[in-house]
Amino acid sequence: MNNNNIHRTELLFLAAIIALGLCTALVMSVINHTWQNTDFADYADDADTYNRTALLLLERGSFHDEHSLYVGMQRRSPGYSVFLALVYGIFGKTPIAVFAVHGLIFITALIVLWMLARSYVPFPYSLVPSLLLSVSWFIALDVTKLSTELLSLLLLLLFVYWFEMFFLSSRPWRALAAGVALSLFLLIKPAALYVIPLVIILIVLRCRKEHFGISWAKTLVFFFIVPAIIIGAWSARSIILFDTWQIQSGSFVLGYRGVEATRPWDRVAAAFIAGLTGDIVADKFLPGYAHDPEPYPSIDETTDRFV
């Protein structure tokens, strides 16, 4: 079999994997009834906060209304709300538009993962990561949910892909592209800021080890110029309005996680098992846990204290 046939076969298998992934998303949306949530009134908690912020961006050009400097119980990172605002502004103010765009994001994530894998392993093994992702039901479920996870996954994959492509070619624009993906990811998952020192160390070590034509100092400049501008601008806004450099408030999350850690040891153990295997498995060790799993009781208790 010549190379052209191998390439064509690989693309056919990739298309089949994409179709399988979309089928997984469809099945999960039916099982969990998420496809029915087509009105803004169907959403609460995080999804409601992101929706309301996105609509304020479209209607007022602002991240808040006249009553507060942020929407909801706590100040959140802006990335996903901006994404929703773009989707609603282009395709109309309906969650169905988000479902469709999430489907495209899921497809793109499968393709990027395949591209990353084929840089290191040959066909057919290069298709295995994408195949596993396509049948990951907990990821496919996010196609018809308003949550940050799917977009975060794509941005993280793009960051890793361009990061690796740079070290395979030493072309500066690829380091710049990796920095763009990272900055957008940080605007959704700001906790990843604490990984930045590790990324810097990794860049310096790899530049020295692989004897690049570009020095590690120039690499750092290309890589961090966009994150410095974007993240720096939002941090400056936070300092001006809230007297903190943090992109979002983490006090509420720290609060309910702290309450969660004060539960009886059998429940703490069940929460640990649930985090690894799921609430149903944890229920086998602590009967009744699946009907009232953490962190929801702790969130309710922290919310009452907050109010």
Image (cartoon, helix red, strand yellow):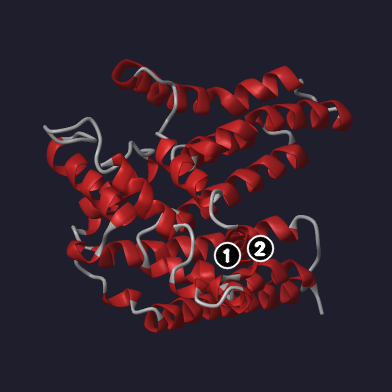
The residue tagged 1 is 110
Q: Is residue 182 above or below residue 224?
A: below
Disc 2 residue type?
A: Trp
Which quadrant of the structure image shows residue 121?
A: bottom right
37 up-or-down from 252: above or below: below
Q: Residue at x 32, y 61 (%)?
A: 98
Residue displayed at 73% across by 33% down: 170
Q: Position of residue 42 (x, y in %)?
A: 22, 67
Instruction: Please identify the quadrant where the N terminus is shown.
Output: bottom right
**Quarter-wise, where is residue 109 in the image?**
bottom right
Please, what secondary structure does the residue beneath circle 1 have? Answer: helix
Which residue is nearer to you in this view: 151 or 68? 68
* Residue 304, numbered circle: none
* Relative side of 219 to 146, left or right: right
Q: Is residue 50 above or below residue 145?
A: above
Please provide percent x and percent y for residue 51: 25, 52
Determine the residue positioned at 15% across, 36% down.
Answer: 65
Q: Secondary structure at mark 2?
A: helix
Q: Is residue 274 above or below residue 252?
A: below
* Residue, disc 2: 114
Gap between marks 1 and 2, in whole Å? 6 Å
Pointer 1 and pointer 2: residues touching (CB < 8 Å)? yes
The residue carrying pointer 1 sits among few (fewer than 14), some (14 to 19) or many (20 or more) residues within 10 Å by Cα, namely: many
Number of callouts in the render?
2
Foreground residue among 15 and 150: 150
Specify the amino acid type for callout 1: Leu
